[in-house]
Amino acid sequence: MANLYGLKKFDLNLLVIFECIYQHLSISRAAETLFITPSAVSQSLQRLRTQLNDPLFIRSGKGITPTKTSVNLHYLLEKNLSQLEKTISMANPANFKKRFVIYSPQLFITPDASQFIHALYQSGNMQVEHHDLQLTSGVGGESTLTAQGGPDTQFVPL
């Protein structure tokens, strides 16, 4: 489990800025990508350097070269930031797949029901689940439905 107290003291935005610098190996290009000033990127990098007690990047020629600590940090961050983006995206209600469950005997899908199911598929964010319904004879010759869970709708012969 994450040490939330330790994370609270650490500005996680610095890691996003670090990753952008690492990808571009340029403060100015990272600033353009992040839509902030090069000065703000430099200040953020300085704060991260202080927190990690490492220079992270060394000036070389016209660019910067990552230190060994920087390479290791990038290796760990690359996967974790990507997973974090996916998690945030999945947490957005607009990205949720809605689940619509239908129970019906396999051979009992009418043209109207078929159009209804097709419309659900076309909505884009709908996951349609069809379960074959077993019809069995009950006491006194009445038909009973055997289905597990709760359907959103059922199509049954009358």
Image (spheres, helix red, strand yellow):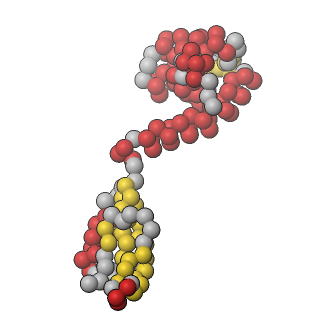
Near-viewer residue (108 or 84):
108
Near-viewer residue (84 or 3):
3
Residue 122 sits in quarter: bottom left
On the question of residue 18 being in view, the answer is no
Quadrant in which the C terminus is drawn = bottom left
Near-viewer residue (157 or 120):
157
* Above or below 20: residue 48: above
Spot occupied by residue 43 in the image (x, y as percentages of width and height): 53, 11
Near-viewer residue (77 or 152):
152
Spot occupied by residue 102 in the image (x, y as percentages of width and height): 36, 69
- Name which residue lies at 49% across and 11% down: 39
Direction left: furthest residue: 112
Direction right: furthest residue: 68
- Name which residue lies at 44% across and 19% down: 36
- Name which residue lies at 29% across and 83% down: 157
Residue 125 sits in quarter: bottom left
On the question of residue 88 being in view, the answer is yes
Spot occupied by residue 84 in the image (x, y as percentages of width and height): 53, 36
Q: Is residue 145 left or right of residue 157?
A: right
Tally of numbered discs:
0
Direction bottom: furthest residue: 141
* Above or below 134: residue 71: above
Direction front: furthest residue: 140
Q: Is residue 41 left or right of residue 3?
A: left
- Name which residue lies at 69% across and 12% down: 53
Quadrant in which the N terminus is drawn = top right
Spot occupied by residue 91 in the image (x, y as percentages of width and height): 43, 41
Q: Is residue 86 left or right of residue 50?
A: left
Residue 135 sits in quarter: bottom left
